[in-house]
Image (spheres, grey):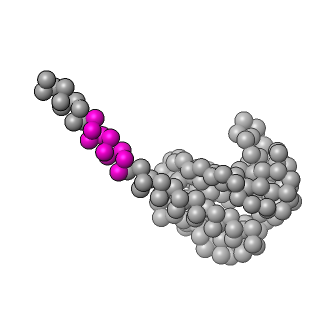
Amino acid sequence: MKSVSSIVRVVLVAGVLALSIAPAMAQANDMAINKAKEFINLLQKGDYSAAYQKVDSNLGFKATPETFRTYWENLVSKAGAFVEFKDASVDTKDGSIVVTQVAKFAKGHVDLKVALDNSMRVSGFQYTNHKAATQSSQAQAPASAAPQAQPAVPTASAPAN
C-alpha cells in the first residue's frame, strides 16, 4: 500500500509542477512574440536603423541597416504591401527562441521567422512562403533562424496564398 501512495505522491507533485510552470512558459512565449512583432514592425515602417538596434552583436557584425532595407524591400517587391499579422508560434532551436509569425501581405501569406537569443535580442531573420516548409525556395536575411548559419544574399519567390 505504501508503494501505491508513493506513486500517487510523485504523480501529484509532477502535476503541480507542470501547472506552475505553464503560466511562466506562456508569458515567455508572449514576450518572444511581442519582440518579434516589434522588430517586424520597425522593418515594415522603414525604420531600419531602429531594427538594427534590436539585433545581437553576432548579427550586428554581419548586417547593417542597409542590409535590412534591401531585404525588406525584396520581400515587399515579391509579396506586396504588408497588411496584418496572423498566427504566431514559438519554438526553440540550437539555444535560440524562434518565433514564426504568419503575416498577410497583399499577394499572400508569408512566414516571418525571427530568432531571439536569451536576452531577447534578434539573432536571425528569415522569411518563407507560408506552409512551404517542403519547398526549397526561401530567402534568408543576414543570418537564418539557426545561429550557426552564414549570411545569404536575399532572394525570394512570390508567396503562396
Chief secondary structure of the magenta portion: helix
Q: Which residue: 42% across, 49% down?
A: 22
Q: In the rendered image, is residue 126 in sight? A: no
Q: Position of residue 3 (x, y in %)?
A: 16, 25
Classify residue 97 as left or right of residue 43: left
In the image, farthest residue toward the top? 1
Q: Quadrant of the N terminus?
A: top left
Q: Which residue: 78% across, 43% down?
A: 137
Task: Give the mark count.
Answer: 0
The residue closer to the viewer here, 118 or 38, is 38
Classify residue 49 as left or right of residue 24: right
Q: Position of residue 145 (x, y in %)?
A: 61, 52
The residue closer to the viewer here, 150 or 9, is 9
Vertical placement of 99 versus 47: above or below? above
Question: Is residue 45 within the magenta segment?
Answer: no
Range of residues picked out in magenta: 11-20
Question: Is residue 16 within the magenta segment?
Answer: yes
Q: In the rendered image, is residue 31 in sight? A: yes
Q: Position of residue 140 (x, y in %)?
A: 71, 53
